[in-house]
Amino acid sequence: MAESGVELFPNQIAIGLSKTGDAINSVDVRHTKTGIITRFNAPVFVDATGDGWLGFWAGAEFRYGREAASEFNESWEKHGDLWSPKVADNKVMGTSVLWNSHKGKNPSRFPSIPWAKAVAKNSDKIQGEWFWEYSNNNLNQIDDAEQIRDHMFRAIYGNFANAKKQPKHALQELKFVAHIGGRRESRRLMGDHIYKMSDATSGTYFDDTVVEEKRELDTHYQKKEKGHSADYLSTALFHHVDMYYIPFRSFYSKDISNLMMAGRCFSCTHVGLTGPRVMNTCAQMGIATGYAAALCKKHNSTPREVGKSHIKELRSLIGYS
Ligand SMILES: Cc1cc2nc3c(=O)[nH]c(=O)nc-3n(C[C@H](O)[C@H](O)[C@H](O)COP(=O)(O)OP(=O)(O)OC[C@H]3O[C@@H](n4cnc5c(N)ncnc54)[C@H](O)[C@@H]3O)c2cc1C
């Protein structure tokens, strides 16, 4: 808000857009408190919705799920199908619901909740971290978000109810249960470059590099896939890599001429997403696409033209020499 030339519109949810040919004209947003709908007209848009909503509405090509290992040569023999399947499927990393409890001053009771039993079974944990995560591949992370969140509620409240039956937890009280699930992966909008595992493992430096990171590839899978009884816990596989670089071509849609992407909906494979899907890298994408939007305006250009004709200027704005 302190930046000049930036206007912030909080409490607004995008609900649709209008298009002419391959370009977006405007995006409609609804105020979450007043219900008032506002139309934003602009020459260029950045989709930072995580779920790629603008691209989806505009008809941009997107991917959801895991590519076959052979499509981009993304196998990791040691972990086989847990890393990358032989045949493409719709598995993605899951949604986490974080929670904790603390010791109160007085003994407290917790109600019996039979509806939770089927998920929690006899487990009796009193807090949950990132690995309290659910990704049933019959459920879609976007369309079935509430069902996924509610499954986690049954795991959480059921565990706590089981714990509360034990005298040692008489003082324990629920402190915090997130009411919104934290989603890791859903739609990925396709750009001129699809960022993939070998881009990270080879450390390829692209002429149009605008984001860089040194963080291992880190994909999650349900513990149940390894015979564990709980289906609401996940674990991670880490593949070590050195510094890797992401080209600007992964941050604009190949189909929609005035649409860029920043965040986990950028153009990548499932494995390609596993490293850059975190805050530092996603924030760099925001910086790159923000500057690119300013250059689109300055040069009356599309993002693709900025990538072709003004990449030196873009990289210099970002801080590259
Ligand atoms: C449990 C958990 C733990 C994590 N731990 C870490 C960690 O320790 N370190 C780290 O770096 N990263 C961590 N991450 C990853 C990191 O939080 C995410 O990868 C990152 O936030 C992705 O950013 P994003 O902006 O692309 O997507 P999101 O975080 O999903 O943000 C998308 C935003 O767009 C908004 N939005 C969606 N649709 C609309 C619409 N139609 N109109 C308006 N707004 C909309 C959403 O409300 C949301 O605010 C964690 C993630 C999870 C789930």
Image (cartoon, rainbow, N blue to C red):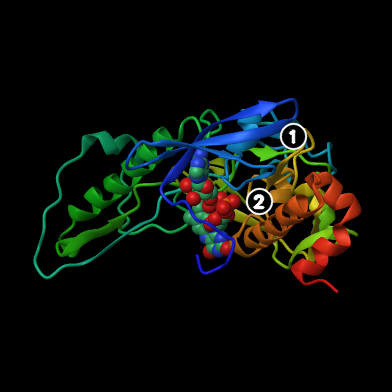
Query: In this image, 163 relative to 268: left or right?
Result: left
Q: Which mark is residue 262?
A: 2
Where is the C terminus found, in terms of image quarters? bottom right
- Name the N-terminal-most of marks 1 and 2: 1
Give SS at disc 1.
loop
Residue that appears at 8% across and 67% down: 106
Give how far apart the Cα atoms at labels 1 and 2 are. Answer: 15 Å
Is residue 298 or residue 119 the one in the foreground? 298
Query: In this image, 124 relative to 242: left or right?
Result: left
| Circle 1: residue type | Ile
Residue that appears at 19% across and 64% down: 168
Give SS at disc 2.
loop
Q: Is mark 1 within 8 Å of ligand 1?
A: no
Q: Is residue 74 visible?
A: no
Query: In this image, 49 relative to 258: left or right?
Result: left
Q: Quadrant of residue 43?
A: top right
Q: Residue extending furthest left?
A: 106
Is residue 165 or residue 192 the one in the foreground? 192
Q: Mark 1 and mark 2 in contact? Answer it, CB < 8 Å.
A: no
Q: Is residue 255 above or below residue 10?
A: above
Residue 101: horizontal and vertical position, in percent? Answer: 27, 62
Classed neighbour count for the residue bearing mark 2: other residues with Cα under 10 Å, few (<14), some (14–19), many (≥20): many
Residue 308: horizontal and vertical position, in percent? Answer: 90, 50
Q: Which residue is mark 1?
A: 256
Q: Is mark 2 within 8 Å of ligand 1?
A: yes
Residue 131: horizontal and vertical position, in percent? Answer: 48, 54
